[in-house]
Amino acid sequence: MKLPKSSPQAFVSTDYSLSHHSERRVNIGVPVLNGQHTLARTLGSLLNQNFENIRIIVTDNGSTDGTPDIVKEFCRMDHRVEYYKFSRGPVEESFARSLELADSSHFMWAAADDFWSPSFLDACFREMTPDVSFVWPNWWVGDLDDGVGTSAPMHPFPYASHPNPRYRTLSFVNTHHLAHKCNIVYSLFETNLIREAYKRQDISDDGALGAVLLSSGKCGLVNEVNFYKHFPSSAMNVDHIQSRWIPKIVRNRRGIQRNFFRHVHRTRRRLTEHFPEWSVEIDKIHSEIRLEGPSPVISSTLQLLLSTEIEAAIE
């Protein structure tokens, strides 16, 4: 899965194989800050969707590199791309701006270094049935520049499509962040759903936002992998970690632990404010969180209890 990082012209196709959903239009928000090395690849993959009725809203959070020139070239070549530059601010404001500008039935965010296969939107819309408010795609994660990464043959979090909001929301809260659960924010949403959810919780705590989303509407899942999440090899390189991060961790272990548990406490507080009726379960989950823990499920006891409840309800 090695992809070029070339000029905008290299990514815009003139031979689309398009599907037409006359009643559906998608706005795609692309928050960016200094994305000149990957942005052309990202915008090209979005424009090459087998789905024509899109509008791409690039919200530039004060870039100082070549990002503006790249986006302006895309705007010149394709009227579906729009560019808005703002003064530097918190990342959640950059996400919010694109959502505020949306005027479509459906909306999605796109990180400025990720990639989508041409079938992405079509695959999501196949799962967007009348009772489904958003669709969470499966993903590949790795370095898009050298093609090293992994994916699962099926969506890793099947609980997200369960009809019981308590089960899917608490299961999500009980899933460790290291399991990439926060990719839920890159779903395809009914615009009204994501707007209402974002009023309650912005993306500054994407885990809490994911829980709000799963409590707000039923989620559809795409099992095929057509969303590619860029995670640079340098972030996973052992030598890089040993040379740059281990000394800092050793020197600042107490500080790291303090910041980690401060974040845990903040998320727990937000979740109990959002879901006071589930505060006992949320407190139990967060009491079992550890700084190190490879298991995607934080509390196996709670997950078993949730599953038992569902089985009993079905019987």
Image (cartoon, helix red, strand yellow):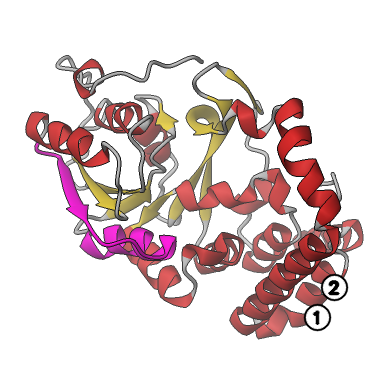
Query: In the image, is residue 249 above or below residue 169?
Result: above
Is 183 in the magenta? Answer: no
Q: Which mark is residue 64?
A: none
Say which quarter of the image contains residue 148: top right
Tell me the tag on residue 284.
2
**Label at residue 280:** 1
Residue 277 in sight from this viewpoint? yes
Q: Which element carries disc 2, helix, strand or loop? A: helix
* Badge 2: residue crowd in 10 Å (few <14, some 14–19, many ≥20): some
Query: Does residue 315 appear in this view?
Result: no
- Picture quadrant where residue 61 is located: bottom left
Residue 286 to residue 151: above or below: below
Q: Is the Cβ of the residue at disc 2 closer than 8 Å to that at disc 1?
A: yes
Q: Position of residue 55 (x, y in %)?
A: 19, 44
Q: Residue at x 85, y 46 (%)?
A: 295
- Which residue is situated farthest in the right direction here? 301
Q: Is residue 82 magenta?
A: yes
Q: Could you say whether the residue bearing mark 1 is in a helix, strand or loop?
A: helix
Amino acid identity at mark 1: Val
Residue positioned 77% across, 49% down in the render: 248
Q: Which residues are magenta?
A: 79-101
Residue 192 at x, y percent in the picture:
33, 66
